[in-house]
Amino acid sequence: MSQAWKPERVSTTSDALALEWYAGDTIVAYVLSDMSAKVLQDWSDAALDVLKNWSFGKPYLALYDLAHAGVVITYLGLVQRKMFSLGITQAGEAQALANIAQRKDFGARVALCASMRHSGHVGGLLATIDARKTRSGQAVQYDVFYAREAALNWLNKAQTQMP
């Protein structure tokens, strides 16, 4: 079943980061149009705020949209090839894990969307490897997509498949 995904609301955190909300605020998309150390920190702060305020009992469903030109490769370097993290930065990840440790039956899905350009394929391949290393035995599932609609469909399916 194909769905035409349009954000229900958008909040702009900076020139390079926008948060888009879908499916009655059950899916958040972090849309990056540029990447730098400052943008990465802004993204981490935004993700931690979203996680802190996420509704208990609902799976955290997030799309990391890195499809703009050059974003995925710069991100790859800044996070030292650890592309999947709920808290984005290393310090943010520690905070995110402390936050979710207090929640029973926490479940999450994170989809990374890369472009079809060469850099997107390289980033997507490395993200797929990272997802495989990260996913074993965790309440968080990660996957990589080259089409935004496929990523949003995968996230949306989790609403009926996760606690």
Image (cartoon, grey):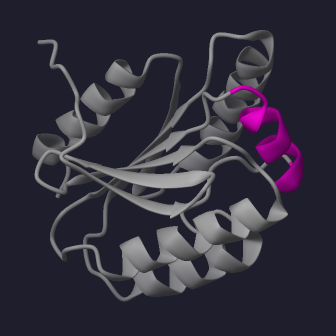
Q: Tell me where residue 128 appears, x and y as whole percent.
A: 65, 29
In the image, residue 136 sits, relative to residue 108, either above or below, namely above
Residue 109, above or below 89: above
Whether 27 is among the magenta residues is no
x and y, in percent, of residue 155 in the image: 29, 38
Residue at 67% across, 43% down: 133
Q: Is residue 74 magenta?
A: yes
Q: Residue at x 47, y 57 (%)?
A: 138
**Magenta segment range?**
69-80
Tell me: 91 left or right of 99.
right
Q: Reply above or below: 120 against 40.
A: above
Quadrant where the C terminus sits is: bottom left
Q: In terms of depth relative to the viewer, which is nearer, 161 or 148?
A: 148
Classified by dominant secondary structure, the portion drawn in magenta counts as helix
- Corner quadrant of residue 2: top left
Residue at the far front in the pictured view:
15
**Residue under the image location 75 percent in, 71 percent down:** 90
Number of dots carrying numbers = 0
Does residue 56 appear to the left or right of 51 in the view shown?
A: left
Q: Position of residue 19 (x, y in %)?
A: 41, 55
Left or right: 133 with respect to 14? right
Front residue of 158/22: it is 22
**Quadrant position of the N terminus in the picture:** top left
Could you tell me residue 131's position as x and y percent?
Answer: 61, 39
